[in-house]
Image: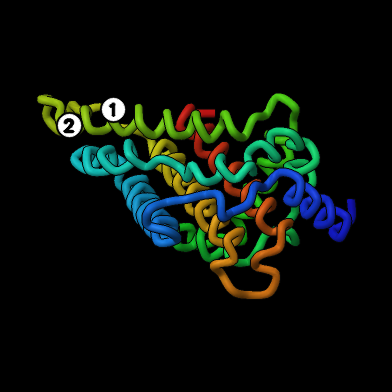
């Protein structure tokens, strides 16, 4: 598909699957999405910092207590977008391209601690095309797995930090694990930001168009998938 054909396809997906945003409620309104973005981004930056100091086991407990409660946005599922990605994984992920990604996603990745977001987007798109463009891929299941992974890993990190062993005897995690945590959280940041796109809470050229919302979510899910792979040493 050409760029125009791909955008038209994503717009059609948006119209068919995405449920009315007004049906998605939260007692704090849009402020909870802004809070979620800031919280996940901050924890992502912390995880990336620990990746550079992975031998400092005393930091694990703090990160663990943060990530075990870092649930990725349920609004992503409630909106119907994950159903759309599930149903059309081959075409959406297989055709994902930079021209479809809203520029605001680069800012979200930068906020999450990625100092070269353009390069990161290229790598995420490559992962989406080669690993997620398959009928066996279930974005909905992947997001659920990511929440489980963060909870279990968070508990393990807390336990490691509280161990009676001396600091030198405590088991250390490889940097890839913390980078994986960061990628999952960065995907959560992008997903929550996508909710603001869909709600029209962000301004800018083309910010609220359907194709941008779907492409942004596809990028978010692919980042989450990358992170899960890193946690599992894949």
Q: Quadrant of residue 148?
A: top left
Q: Residues within 10 Å of mark 1 (few under 14, many from 20)?
A: some
- For the residue labelled by badge 2, is the local secondary structure a helix, a strand or a loop? loop
Q: Could you tell me residue 90's position as x and y percent?
A: 78, 36
Q: CA distance from mark 1 to mark 2?
A: 17 Å
96 on left or right of 233? right
Percent position of residue 122, x then y: 66, 53
Label 1 residue SS: helix
Residue 195: image quadrant is bottom right
Residue 168's disc is 2
In this orientation, which residue lies closer to the viewer: 142 or 46?
142
Up-down relation of residue 159 to residue 27 (above or below): above
Q: Residue furthest front?
A: 23
Q: Residues within 10 Å of mark 2 (few under 14, many from 20)?
A: few
Q: Earlier in the sequence, mark 1 or mark 2?
A: 1
Taking the view exactly as shown, the residue that stands out farthest to the bottom is 204
The structure residue drawn at horizontal position 53% and vertical position 54%, both measured from the top left corner, is 190
User: How many labels, in total?
Assistant: 2
Residue 27: give its label. none
Q: Is residue 69 visible?
A: yes
| Horizontal side, residue 85 vs residue 143: left or right | right
Residue lying at 56% horizontally and 32% vertically, measured from the top left: 142
Per the image, the residue denoted by label 1 is: 156
């Amino acid at each position: 598909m050409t760029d125009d054909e791909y955008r038209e396809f994503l717009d059609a997906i948006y119209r068919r699957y995405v449920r009315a945003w007004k049906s998605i409620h939260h007692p704090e309104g849009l402020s909870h999405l802004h809070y979620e973005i800031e919280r996940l981004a901050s924890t992502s930056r912390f995880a990336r910092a620990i990746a550079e100091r992975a031998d400092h086991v005393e930091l694990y407990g703090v990160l663990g207590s943060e990530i075990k409660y870092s649930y990725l946005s349920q609004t992503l599922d409630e909106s119907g977008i994950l159903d759309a990605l599930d149903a059309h994984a081959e075409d959406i992920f297989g055709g994902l391209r930079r021209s479809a990604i809203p520029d605001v996603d680069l800012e979200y990745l930068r906020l999450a601690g990625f100092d070269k977001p353009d390069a990161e987007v290229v790598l995420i798109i490559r992962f989406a095309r080669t690993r997620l463009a398959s009928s066996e891929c279930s974005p909905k299941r992947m997001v659920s797995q990511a929440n489980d992974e963060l909870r279990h890993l968070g508990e393990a990190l807390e336990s490691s930090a509280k161990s009676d062993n001396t600091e030198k005897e405590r088991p250390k995690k490889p940097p890839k694990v913390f980078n994986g945590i960061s990628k999952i959280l960065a995907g959560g940041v992008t997903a929550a930001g996508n909710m603001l796109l869909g709600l029209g809470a962000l301004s800018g050229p083309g910010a609220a168009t359907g194709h941008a919302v779907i492409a942004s979510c596809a990028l978010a899910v692919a980042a989450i998938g990358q992170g899960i792979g890193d946690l599992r040493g894949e």
